[in-house]
Amino acid sequence: MTRILITGALGQIGTEISALLIEKYGKKNVIISDMREPSKNGISENCRKLDVTDGAVLEKVVNEEGITDIFHLAAILSATGERNPELAYMVNSVGTFNILKVSVKTGINKVIIPSSIAVYGPSSPKKDTPVISVTRPDSIYGITKVDNELLSSYFRKKFGLDVRGIRFPGLLSYKTLPTAGTTDYAVDMIMKASLGEDYTCYLSPDRTLPMMYMPDALEALMKLYNADKSRLRYSTEYNISAFAFSPKQLENELKRIFPGFKVSYVPDYRDEIASGWPESLDCSDAVKDWDFKPRFSLHEMVDDMSRNFRLLNTKH
């Protein structure tokens, strides 16, 4: 029987992957956890408050719940990480080491650990950036994600642990709003336009970054989770994205639907973080190894998100 532990289950990805896994495996077999107290409220019958930096408590939860697989989504994101580097290191690096160590000790079948385009840095190629490339980031978030990738590869080779993951681009969703990522401006901009409000963007108008709509991200994560292990050449390093755009391009796309929408640009420290990231990614390895194929275009995503934001606003 599959018993899945999700760390960081109240975050942007965690909230939506939890629902997907519960639909597939049932409420009794998905244990959601977070530093905040998870509310049962129909999401899952098994909710735990869990600090991944405490290895002893993590091991206790894994044993008590009979966990077979782990989706490790607990992380401090880029903007918060720059404000509190020590916290980012403890959660992202120490927490991930604890996950890997406990997984080996308790015989976990599969561990899913998302990575990020933040592993790249100013010396990385900007366009069609390949999986095997220079990864010398200058943000603490990126540094910890490189650490996670190397640890995952090490545990895979040394202990035979099945660790899998994706370098996520910026993710957009109308269901669970992001709070601390550098690419979050895109969700904010679409939401503001949908509500008839103007927007002040903290990135430069021409700061092009790879992006993806959440339904495609979730489908990719599940496809990798279920992929034949023998086909996987990498551990947590797979690049994926659906499209790339700049804030100005997104603004113009929104003006197609909302002609009166206005954006002003006041770049801050987050623009400096994003300046070291790729403008586009080479995703051919994910296509070859586990049939990655996004469904939504930029045009389709903007239409769907703006429509849903307007529906949510009407309900409230």
Image (spheres, helix red, strand yellow):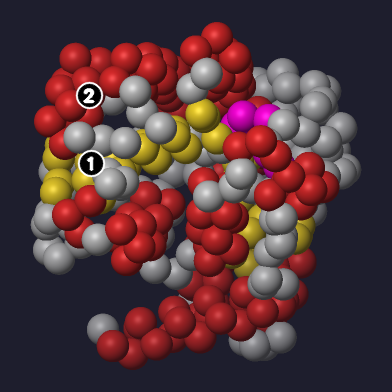
* Residue type marked 1: Ser
Between discs 1 and 2, the one toward the N terminus: 1
- Where disc 2 sits, the SS reads helix
- Where disc 1 sits, the SS reads strand
Does the magenta segment cover residue 202?
no
Where 243 sits versus 75, above or below?
A: below
Quadrant showing the C terminus: bottom left
The residue where tag 1 is placed is 33
Does the magenta segment cover residue 237?
yes
The residue shown at (18%, 26%) is 63
Residue 238 percent coordinates (x, y): 68, 38
Residue 119 percent coordinates (x, y): 65, 28
**Label 2 packing within 10 angstroms: few (<14), some (14-19), many (20+):** many
**Image-quadrant location for residue 260:** bottom right
Residue 86 visible in the current orientation: no
Residue 282 visible in the current orientation: yes
Q: Nearer the viewer, residue 164 or 34?
A: 164
The residue where tag 2 is placed is 58
**Image-quadrant location for residue 15:** bottom left
